[in-house]
Amino acid sequence: MSIARYLLAPWWVAQLATGAKSFKDNPLIGSHALNARGLHVARVKLAHRMAWARRRRLAALMTADDRAAFDRDGFLIRREALPSAEFAALRDAVFAHPAPAREMVQGDTVTRRIALDPAFLAAVPQMRALLRQPLWAGAIRYAGSFDAEPLAYIQTILARRYDAEPDPQTALHADTFHPTVKAWLFLTDVDEEDGPFRYVPGSHRLSPGRLAFERETSLKAPGGTDHLSARGSFRVEEDRLEALGLPPAKSFATPANTLVVADTFGFHARQRATRPSTRVEIWAYGRRNPFLPWTGLDWTGISGIAERRIPLLWKSRDVLERLVGQPWRSVGIKTPRDP
């Protein structure tokens, strides 16, 4: 074991300059002694300083009003994001197209994803138009602080499908230690009973309270009972928000054709549904090395490569399942609204 630790030491050191976040998998990231001396807080501060510098260079991608709202709150919500006829054509085409699907079960909830691969984009040309739409593309790039093509899926949330513990996504959390982006264009209405998006406004900013929380949690995470916090996705209790200088979380019931773009360093969650429900959304996710000084140079986002990334990632994890695990199980050909 000591030989293995010696051989892996350069890898662990190199990971400090990346988005690596697990306090369990890297003994330097999870070191109580180093974090007591400020290692985790230093990574957080540097990553955020660089993200805001990149955002300043991408400011022209958003309107001044949208940018101000995002900078203040950590999210942007735009109802009637697309013209009604354009949205209806996109929604109907997505709902009608069967495609290879994968599903993951977390607690009482099933999440289904369909990749926007070359076959899907050829069958649903309205989707390619959305990915190039200025509001969609610009807000995602600004929020993520990179001029990079996100991974995008058709995502279906089938809530309250099992008699089980709540979906862990219903607990307020940050995805990682640095600014990242997730986006949702809802193709169906999401009522309060269906488990809408929740966010703590302003929690994406590095206030003194948030930095104190980051330091405190970095010292507890490696040996704590919350395995998701130990993996670097810190959970926060609702009753701690006021002490951190933060307001209560807001929930956003959203009609179809609402776009939400959020910095998921901010505390967020999916409210737990109170009834079995099915919601369908176009979901995008972007995360790059937070310590890159440039905004672009995203070779994986080149047309011809970008749309093949998700199938390649799924197949790679299928092959390497014994080593890295594979939570996404193939469920054959489905449409987004299949039961």
Image: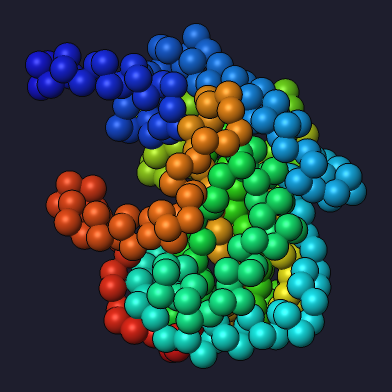
Please indicate whether residue 6 sits to the left or right of residue 94 in the image: left
Q: Position of residue 310 (x, y in %)?
A: 38, 59
- Of residues 123 and 232, the one nearer the viewer is 123
- Of residues 210 and 122, the one nearer the viewer is 122
Quadrant occupied by the N terminus: top left
| 308 versus 222 height, above or below | below
Quadrant occupied by the C terminus: bottom left
Please indicate whether residue 10 sits to the left or right of residue 47 in the image: left
Q: Position of residue 312 (x, y in %)?
A: 31, 57
Residue 112 visible, this angle: no
**Of all residues shown, which one is farthest toward the top?**
37
Question: How many numbered discs sit on the rendered protein?
Answer: 0
Which quadrant of the figure has residue 193?
Answer: bottom right
| 211 versus 74 height, above or below | above
Query: What residue appears at the point 63 percent right and 83 percent down from the top-left corner?
Result: 91
- Of residues 198 and 53, the one nearer the viewer is 53
Residue 322 visible, this angle: yes
Query: What residue appears at the point 50 percent right and 40 percent down from the top-left corner?
Result: 298
Please indicate whether residue 155 sits to the left or right of residue 249 in the image: left
Query: What residue appears at the point 71 percent right and 51 percent down from the top-left corner?
Result: 138
